[in-house]
Amino acid sequence: MGSLHARLLAGVGMFVGLALASAGAEAATRGGTLIYARYADSLFLDPVLNDANVDIWILTNLYDTLLAPTSDGQGVSPSLATKWDVATDGKTVTLTLRSGVKFSDGSPLTPQDVKWSLDRARDPKAGAWNFTLAAVDTIETGPDTVVLKLKHADPTLLPALATFNAAILPQKQFEASSGSSMEEKAKAFAEHPIGTGPFAFVSWKRGEVMKLKRNDYYWKMGEDGKPLPYLDALEFPVIPDDSTRLLKLKAGEIDGTEFVPYARVKDLQADPSLRMELWPSTRVRYLTLYVGDKYKDGSPNPISNPKVRQALNYAINKDAVIQITTLNLGKPMRSYMSSSTPLFSGAAPLYPYDPAKAKALLAEAGFANGFSFSCLSLSGNGDDANDLTAAQQMWAQIGVKLKIEQVDNPTRTAKYRAEDFQCRTSAWTDDIADPSEITSYFAYYPNIHSLHSGFDDKRIDELFEKSQEENDKTARTAEYKEIQDRYNSAAPIVYLYETPYPVAFRKNAKGFVQIPLGNNLFESAYIEK
Amino acid sequence: MNRASYTAARLLQIVPTFILIGIVVFVLVRILPGGPVAALLGDKASDEAIERITRQLGLDAPILVQFWRFLETIARGDLGDSIAYHVAVVRLIAERLPVTLLLTGMATIFAIALAVPLAFVAAVTQNRWPDLAIRGAFQVGLSSPIFYVGLILLTVFAGAMHIFPVGGYGETPGEHLYHLFLPALALALSFSAVIMRSLRASVIEVLSAEFVDFARAKGLRRRIVLGRHVLRNALISTVALIGLQIGDLLGGAVITESVFAVPGVGRLMVDSIFARDYPVIQGLTLALAVLVSLVFLATDLVQMALDPRVAK
């Protein structure tokens, strides 16, 4: 099966190469409307109060942040700030603002807008994401600079300034919105958002279509030396049904679409009028296990024994699951974090398929005759059904009986939060170009009890806390190596696979970029005439 | 009772129905496992964030207090704000209900246009080949899932032949009709089968009634017997059936709207249930309850027009 992965990697590499070549060789055409169909609509266009992927993946087209994630998701690059300077003690960050930047209504961006936006984003009463800026103590403004004074050195601050919730909004226009409280003003402002991003808001019929037009004041230059974006307008119709979305693409009624089902990728690749794109992502698929000593009903939990969890992992034939669910588009996990996450240190695929070893481990743990447990799965979700029925058959080989319990998403979330589950299907995508987000959720107990699994490793907690204030990159890399090794060998999850983002376009719609964090970038997209 | 006072009495009956349905849906959505805040904030949210937003939305109050606030918003002619979309429920419904009304209206017209003539042909050729062919064809229509029929219509007429657009709703009234043609047809197929079977049975029954023999014996022409006497009497029970099917039609609209990307209330309802968006589920259920009551009333009025005995 190794050759398959090599082929996949070669394919992805070729695609990235092609994308780069096409961006470099052909001049982009200006004008036109690009129609990109989405599987679900946005909910609420406020970067601070909301954090659904359907919103944040779009917000980057309306708003800018001081820094931007690089397109490989590994670091940060200039955006509204052209220069940033971190003091040697790591406790002062000075950012120089780009001059001449205007909001989409033509008003100028000021250092005061930046201070106000970041103060709002870090207000513990405002949004769920204030923790990303928790190290900030005070913000001072100069004529063209913003100075962040930190309580302690924070290696995650620069990536945090490139994250959706640190978007810069115009203070005056926001405060002039109707309503008496900040929440009401946020609602009113989100009805007609104004940002410095490449596109400006036009209209939104919820559940039907959102329309954006080019922001004539946008600061970034295209390859032709004129300001981006190339497109005049951008439309996001909502088409929840996969087959309908693809039929619409094939009929030429839309220019591109997201979340192509894995089963359809080959078919679209063979269509000469289309171009299938598989963007490297930070998405990982796994099963979360509850690892506490006892379940809510008081019965003992066999999965609390690390040997049992290792056995469950060894018994899964990853290549077969990858074939069944993703038609070989996925690749096995080498750590709990994706291989696109910074400081990822996985050397080889974890827990290579070995049923004999799995049986031996179960016997060592005192479960030579196996045991049974149940796993929560989303009803109607094909990936969940495929992954779990495959796991069910594979675990049956080592005497473990799996019961698949189909529920809807709010039910699954409620049981998960109450830590009243034995196993559940899960997927994760990073939002920040830094390993701290995924690690704080997966491995650091004080945050959400390590994915509500109850996994509690004091050494990991200590290393994580240290790494959060670590100013030395080499030391931080070593800390993350140890965290990953410890977590991966304790296996509080069942490792399944990483997948790319599958998107498809008409042949003449080019220049779209989806970064590993999922952000949809349309600033350089164009339609070839 | 004359027609006006009958209508007024029936309209008054909607009020208790409305209150009862309000109570039932208010309790039912809260019995569902999982709440709107956890569904909205997702798996990544911290307990503090969930508690804070639950408090902001007033969902931490005792259920009776919440019910009182719900009554207050309704008394103001308001249905509250959507938790997921952060806009007024009334606005969401106003944007999307007309779409579903147009879709179900078109589907009803298609179904009647398809079913009535064929039911007549089937009835008068009872158990001969035209009857068997029509019944066979409708049996297929009745037993095919809307989802499947929809995809086939899309693939053939939109994907391959490009006669119709692949889903969506368009911008102008003309475009709306054009975009809704295939979804209305998909929805009409199973509906028309129900009408056809009922109407065929009624026509056969009426054809054997004494007054038809009498009309024939009087020497009335066949067309007048069928058109004036048989159709009118056979339609009475069919009209009631069409009215009663409104619930099924709205249920079918949920699926049709998803397959054809039609932005109607069916999809809004499904999305809102998965998001546990209490105000939208409550508001929409009440709006649909009123709608169904009005359709039942209209059905009765049409029946009265066809058969004055109903009013008595």
Image (spheres, coloured by chain):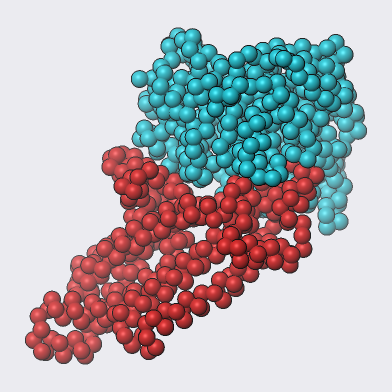
Chain colours: A cyan, B red
Residue at 23 percent across and 67 percent down: it is: B118
Q: Is residue B66 left or right of residue B78?
A: right
Residue A494 appears anywhere in the view: yes
Vertical position of residue B229 compared to residue B154: above or below: below
Q: Quadrant of the C terminus of chain A?
A: top left
Count of numbered badges drawn on the protein: 0
The residue lying toward the viewer, choosing from A403 and A261, is A261
- Position in image of residue A43 (x %, y %): 59, 42
Res A155 → quadrant: top right
Q: Quadrant of the N terminus of chain A?
A: top right
Residue A355 appears anywhere in the view: no
Q: Is residue B85 left or right of residue A474?
A: left
Q: Is residue A104 left or right of residue B101?
A: right
Q: Is residue B95 left or right of residue B120?
A: right
Vertical position of residue B250 compared to residue B6: above or below: above
Residue at 38 percent across and 74 percent down: it is: B299
Vertical position of residue A137 compared to residue B66: above or below: above
The residue lying toward the viewer, choosing from B197 and A263, is B197
Res B297 → quadrant: bottom left
The residue lying toward the viewer, choosing from A282 and B85, is B85
Residue at 69 percent across and 26 percent down: it is: A113
- Position in image of residue A396 (x %, y %): 69, 46
Res B194 → quadrant: bottom left
- Position in image of residue A364 (x %, y %): 85, 39
- Position in image of residue B58 (x %, y %): 73, 55
